[in-house]
Amino acid sequence: MQQPCSYSAVLMGSPILLKLAQHDERLAHDVFRLIRQQENLFTVNRAGSQLMAINAAAGKHPVAVSASVFALIERAREVSLLPGCCFNFAIGPLVKRWKIGFKGDSVPPAHELKALLALTRPELVQLDKQQHTVFLPEAGMEIDLGAIAKGYIADRVRDFLHQQGCYCGLINLGGNLQTLDAPEGETSWAIGLQKPFGEPGALIATVAVSNKSVVTSGIYERYFELDGRCYHHILDPQTGYPLDNELLSVTVISDSSLDGDIFTTLLYGLGVEKGLALLADYPQIEAVFVTRKQQVVLATQQPFRLLDESYQVIDSTA
Ligand code: ADP
Ligand code: MG
């Protein structure tokens, strides 16, 4: 078998890895350029993005955005309004205040979080389908697509590679992985699931997939510790504090990486039991939950191989 060629870069604050069946410097260059272009639309950390323009106009006026940005915001709003859903695309003010992953190392005062909660109401965000405008009616409101931008971009990379006639490869956007066909002679890619709080590169297991997205969201990625508690970067939109439950990570396997990204946050908020109940309604979405009790709960049909014997596998599909 011919080994795939790897290309890497650091974009969106994350290590990016592209694998192609054949050496193709030009194609790799075009893929990284596409990622950069897409990031420039969605970042909330640098001036000039369409999202920053919307946030800067909060309480003032609607802002017209491109069709693709509008469509992603529309989807984000729809998901944020699902009953009991902890995904909230208007979470920006809380994310900014906590600064987790961006030098944040203290718990903001409760009264401040309470005040900010009033600005994180997705139902207030006004969308105009005809004009493609987005309006945040209250000053201080902010959209944050940090939970789903990478998934959306991973799908764009897949589409681009297909358009270029490239059908074998994978793209890993710092934990958001989208796979094409497996390398010649193989039936799948073995995707490693990282060990929460383990050494870099330490894996709990691998899952074998092709032409599927694998997205992992874990509390070990960005967090700080204080007085024995772990404050991580997925916030509970009801309380304003990081979500606190039995989960260390959730991996979602799906066709679309955007779906994967949405479902990791959603399942994170639900926990194992309610998460499994939700998945029963979405047969095209599969998941792997890793819990604080060292359990790996499988809700997937993809071949799964445990590498770390200190974890116990519970197959919910058995
Ligand atoms: P990453 O893969 O970069 O670790 P995730 O996909 O897990 O990121 O999403 C975490 C990011 O999503 C946070 O850094 C923040 O920007 C945003 N976020 C945090 N809490 C929520 C929430 N409840 N709903 C939507 N987005 C959130
Ligand atoms: Mg995500």
Image: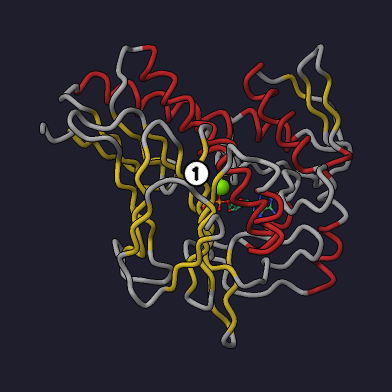
Q: Count the labels in the image.
A: 1
Q: Amino acid at mark 1?
A: Ile
How many neighbours does mark 1 have within 10 angstroms: few (below 14), some (14-19), or many (20 or more)?
many
Could one spot residue 188 in this view of the protein? Answer: yes
Which colour assignment does the render follow? secondary structure
Give percent across and percent down for residue 270: 70, 59
Residue drawn at x 33%, y 58% as measured from the top left: 305
Give percent across and percent down for residue 280: 67, 47
Give percent across and percent down for residue 24: 19, 21
Quarter in which the N terminus is drawn = top left
Q: Secondary structure at mark 1?
A: strand
Residue drawn at x 66%, y 71% as measured from the top left: 245
Which of these two is toward me, 32 or 180? 180
Q: Is residue 263 above or below residue 107?
A: above
Give percent across and percent down for residue 54: 73, 32
Judge from the rendering whether residue 148 lies leftward or rightward of residue 193; answer left or right: right
Tell me where residue 125 sits by quadrant: top right
The residue at the far left in this view is 1
Which of these two is toward me, 244 or 254? 254
Which of these two is toward me, 236 or 283? 283
Residue occupied by mark 1: 253
Q: Is residue 204 above or below residue 145?
A: below
